[in-house]
Image (spheres, grey):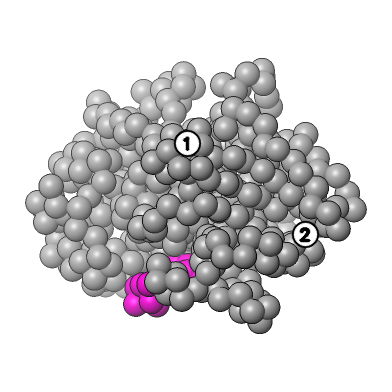
Amino acid sequence: MSFDSLGLAPALLRALSEQGYTMPTPIQAEAIPLILAGHDLLGGAQTGTGKTAAFSLPLLHRLSKQTPARGPRKPRVLVLVPTRELAVQVHENLRGYGRHLQVASCTIFGGVGMGPQVDALRRGVDVLIATPGRLIDHMERGSVRLDGIEVLVMDEADRMLDMGFLPAIKRVLGKLPRERQTLLFSATFEAQLKALALEFMRDPKQVQVAANNTIAETIAHRAHPVDAERKRELLIEILATRHTDQVIVFGRTKHGCNRLAEQLEKSGIRAVAIHGNKSQAQRQKALNAFKGAKARVLVATDVAARGLDIPNLPLVINFDLPMVAEDYVHRIGRTGRNGAQGEALSLVSHDEGGLLRQIQRVLKKDVELVDFPGYEPGRSLRLDVALPNPRAKRAGDGPRKPSHRPHGKPAPRHAHAGTAQGRGERNGRSRRRGGQGAG
């Protein structure tokens, strides 16, 4: 099956072709026809399955069939997401797929001033991507109207419930038209989420895509505790020790990856960076340099790393730990392949202890902590830091209250990747004073 066979608008097919995508992932192949047919949908899919495109493409197709109204437009599509970074990533994907369409979209999330968001809403949008807390802020001050919503998407619904957003979600649902299409995507469907779906969805179809989180048994997982300000120095020391090994180094941000690659170059280590801000030609040039051994280190964000066709490597280094533990699995998948031995090495600072704990839960085993001589940290790691973790209860930790600590991840960029998650949005009126809203 190809995207051409799904009945999408020519403008969407053109955008996909320009980005080099012709074959849909399983979640896209199953979900897109159902959404185009107008069904409500329960989509069981985790990060890395391509679910962002699974709902974005049919929504854009729907919007493309109507001429934009004159004057300011009320939102016709609402996408609810748990985190600000995921909101940004969904927005970037929508803009990429809809580059040849006249579709206006914007994001609203906490942690920033409301003024620019109010201005964007006043100008009019077709698609609104929002975190629940900040959306309620706008609803309360009258800067957004939801009576024109035709389609509601709840992305990563299990995480929203885990983070304590159920009351906020129900408030939003109460302001939406009853006659609408509703799409709910979640990695898991536990009792509370099923009850919510039965309450506000109409005879939903269900699509389930198995997670691809297999971890090779041949991979050794190690972590070097280190002060954050000495990470770069330690990385250079490790690369000097490993001599000729080619390495993928994962960073958290686009700017950070660029800067790290430049610093490695200044240290005499050939390095290239690859991330979502680079054009397809730039990404391919960097990848070719790495594959052709002209560069020894490929510094990448999660956004750019998904779907890369890179041969097996002996070593993958996490310069920054991923903000969502499942991304660790995707990162290390380039080593230990086909029975070969591999190593996943993480440089972990004091404030990343909670993230390391989440990774250990996903791995179902401890990551070996090894002090690197001369780089012992001034403060010990805190593995007891509580961060939102939808899998915590299933991992055998017993009952857990929702946490509102920062939590999230960098995001993948394309049709064959999952969406990104980021810092957790805070919930509650006490954290939305002074126009700052939920985080």
Q: Is residue 74 above or below residue 156?
A: below
- Tell me the quarter of the picture where residue 367 sits: top right
x then y, percent, for residue 180: 28, 41
Q: Which segment is the magenta one? A: 273-288
Residue 49 in view (yes/no): yes
Number of numbered labels in the structure image: 2
- In the foreground, 415 or 215: 215
**Cβ atoms under marks 2 and 1 closer than 8 Å:** no
| Residue that label 2 marks | 228
Tell me where residue 260 sits by quadrant. bottom right
Q: Which mark is residue 216?
A: 1
| Residue drawn at x 45%, y 50% as measured from the top left | 334
* Residue 287 magenta-highlighted: yes
Q: x and y percent of residue 199 in the render?
A: 39, 25
Amino acid type, callout 1: Ala
Question: Crowding near pointer 1: few (<14 within 10 Å), some, many (20+)?
Answer: some
Q: CA distance from mark 2 to mark 1?
A: 29 Å
Could you say where residue 372 lies in the image, as x and y percent from the top left?
79, 52
Question: 348 or 104: which is nearer to us?
Answer: 348
